[in-house]
Amino acid sequence: MALDVESIIKDFLILSTTTRGGKRLVYLDSAATSQKPESVINAVSDYYRTYNANIHRGLYDISAKATDAYIRSKELVAKLINAPSYNEVIYTRNTTESINLVGLSWAERNISKGDTVLITQMEHHSNIVPWQMLAKRKGAKVEYIKLADQATLNLEDYKKRLEKHPKLVAFTHVSNVLGTINDVRKLTKMAHDTGAVVVVDAAQSVPHMQVDVKSIGCDFMAFSSHKMLGPAGIGVLYGKEELLEQMEPIYGGGDMIRSVKFDGCTWNELPWKFEAGTSNVEGGIGLGTAVEYINRIGVKNIRKHEIDMTRYALKLLEEEQGVITYGIRRKDIDENNRAGVISFNIKGAHSHDVAEIFNSEGVAIRAGHHCAMPLVNEIIGEPSVARMSFYLYTRKEDIDTAIVAIQKVRKVLRLENK
């Protein structure tokens, strides 16, 4: 069913504001961070106003209420991704910390000199730099699955690299630059068939589509609250329980221990052994409320809406002189291969100038390398690209305004005849 976007927008008061130039705010940067509905803002505010307390430690009512709300948020997250138990849901600060946790715990103890970590050429820095740092520490090496074109993975190259039996394979579910949706279920099976452990960066997928960790079969998955209508400062690491049980915590302190003596300590049970110190209680509560909001709208409905917005935007962009888009073309889009992310350039214009002129029209987009420098600089071959990204509150009118902004770019920079 089609989303009632006009009703949804009423839940996001920021989308009713105007910019400093008096223009209506058009927010097309949800791949960087999403806006927050009033229910999430109110949930965090209500926690602070009525039951602010530390969890797990208090034998008084508001502490018990906070503990219950925090645990319920984990249950909601586990159900959203079809994890068997909230014991497999570790809260971190963000996707980046989740991936680093795998690197500093599982990989630190299982990757040795000469071993290979295999990732793709379309990764965000969060799924490149931790493995480069690991390789430097351990004397291992990082290899990259090539792209078949400037949009999709080369599966033949993947097969050849798997013949070297990498210890760990890590890949993004959705590229934050290209919008490409990778067949992570297939990629995971191929990696498991060679004995590798699999890490999936799902920062750009969990907020926008149905994600089932049982079906995918991955060993670890990372994503962030702030990209899925929730607060910043809290992320998720899903991990298979048997692997998490084997892993050592990377932070020590309160709450992650079962017992402490002068001559040593033992760890708490899952998921708490990885969550040292005072938790981001309000973040967890806000994330749980965000999941409830997403469930109420329906991830299938969100996905269908974003496909419609992406096709509509690409059609209009194709009609604009001098606009170059990256990723799977409109005629080749289906529900399984492209998300609501469109990176583009305008011939003769730097992406930063494009973003500034868009801003003058009230349109918020992203410009730069999008924390994917190897992809943008070495594969696409540009110093930077502009990017618009969509979510459940995006309207066709927003995209129409973006097209007007493109026309203004060409006029201001005198590109009409170029």
Image: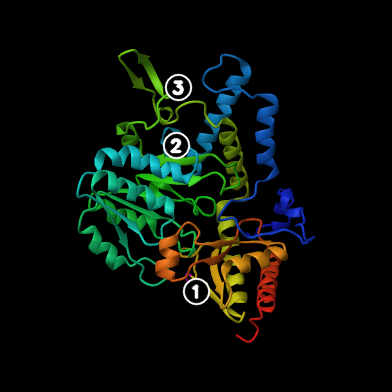
Q: Which residues are magenta?
A: 327-332
User: Dot 1 corresponds to which residue?
Assistant: 329
Residue at 59% x, 25% y: name it. 66
Which structural element holds mark 1? Answer: loop
Q: Is residue 118 above or below residue 288?
A: below
Nearest the viewer among 20 and 338 is: 20
Asked whether residue 340 appears in the rendered view, the answer is no
**Structural crowding at the residue carrying mark 3, measured as other residues with C-alpha within 10 Å and reported as few (<14), some (14–19) or many (≥20):** some
Amino acid, disc 1: Arg
In this rendered view, identify the residue nearer to me: 17 or 221. 17
Q: Earlier in the sequence, mark 1 or mark 2?
A: 2
Q: Residues within 10 Å of mark 1 (few under 14, many from 20)?
A: some
Image depth: mark 3 or mark 2 in front: 3
Q: Residue at x 60, y 32 (%)?
A: 282
Labelled disc at residue 89: 2
Q: In the picture, which quadrant includes the N terminus? A: bottom right
Estimate the spatial distance between the alpha carbons at disc 1 and disc 2, rounded to whole Å. Answer: 36 Å
**Number of the label disc, if any, that sits on residue 3:** none
Kind of residue indicated by mark 2 = Val
Where is residue 166 drawn, in percent x and y? 24, 52
Label 3 is placed on what type of residue? Gly
| Mark nearer the N terminus (3 vs 2) | 2
Q: Residue 411: percent from the left, percent from the top? A: 69, 78
Q: Secondary structure at mark 3?
A: loop
Q: Secondary structure at mark 2?
A: strand
Say which residue appears at 62% left-offset and 44% top-offset. 293
| Label 3 sits on residue | 254
Provide residue 46's location: percent of width, then percent of height.
69, 31
Q: Is residue 291 magenta?
A: no
Q: Is residue 350 visible?
A: yes
Residue density around tag 2, few if under 14, some if 14–19, many if 20 or more, within 10 Å: many
Residue 59: x percent and y percent? 56, 14
